[in-house]
Image: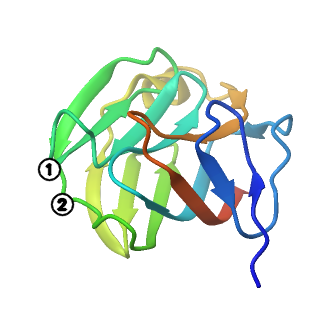
Amino acid sequence: MQSFFKFCIVSKQIFVTGTKIPPSEKYKLPLKIDLRAKTSETDIVLCFGNGRIMLNHMYMRGMVAICDPTDGKPCFYNCTEIPPDEFADVEWILAREAMIIKVNGETRHFTPNYHYIEAFETNPGYEMSSEIGVTSFGGSLVTVESLRVTEI
């Protein structure tokens, strides 16, 4: 029998089936976030700083919305949707050289064009830390099976 408990940083629509990551814990860039989750309908949202990735966007089907962690500036890219009620493995890598998003081992996004990367290039001592958040929109329920953060 699985036990469910709320993992609530930015939403009451999140349930976790594994180890709870304390909401108050902060992580430093560069880092890699591994999430195994499913959504009942739309919007699996992973957050760090002012940034986020939004998979299965409810208004832009077939797109991933990405916001830069430093300034929250959004951009949108084509991305295959995750079928509802099926667990998916999501990797969000915020490296010094590039941002990479993988879903089920397939690279869905790779680019060096983000402000946080510019900050590392212009200031090698640049530091940014934040909590990790998982949320959804539009009433969808996101179930988190695992969430692991690795500073790289």
> How far across and how far down the image is residue 41, in percent?
33, 53
Comes first in the chain, label 2 or label 1? 1
Question: In what element is the residue under mark 2?
Answer: loop
Q: Nearer the viewer, residue 42 or 110?
A: 42
Vertically, is 77 above or below 3? Answer: above
Residue at (39%, 73%) from the top-left corner? 86
Q: Secondary structure at mark 1?
A: loop
Quarter of the rendering occupied by the N terminus: bottom right
Kindly identify the amino acid type of the residue bearing the numbered disc 1: Gly
Q: Is residue 107 left or right of residue 62?
A: right
Q: Nearer the viewer, residue 94 or 43?
A: 43
Badge 1 is on which residue? 62
Instruction: Count neighbours of disc 1 (C-alpha within 10 A) and say few if under 14, some if 14 to 19, many if 20 or more.
Output: some
Residue 134, by quadrant, is top right
Task: Using residue 86 as the reference point, say whether residue 69 is left or right of it.
Answer: right
- Give the labeled residue for mark 2: 80
What residue is rendered at 86% in x and 45% in y? 22
Task: Give the residue at x 32% y 64%.
Answer: 84
- Asked if the residues shown at circle 2 and circle 1 are in contact, with their CB atoms under 8 angstroms apart, the answer is yes
Count up the numbered dots.
2
Q: Residue at x 51, y 53 (%)?
A: 142
Q: Residues under labels 2 and 1: Cα distance? A: 5 Å
Q: Position of residue 34 (x, y in %)?
A: 58, 63
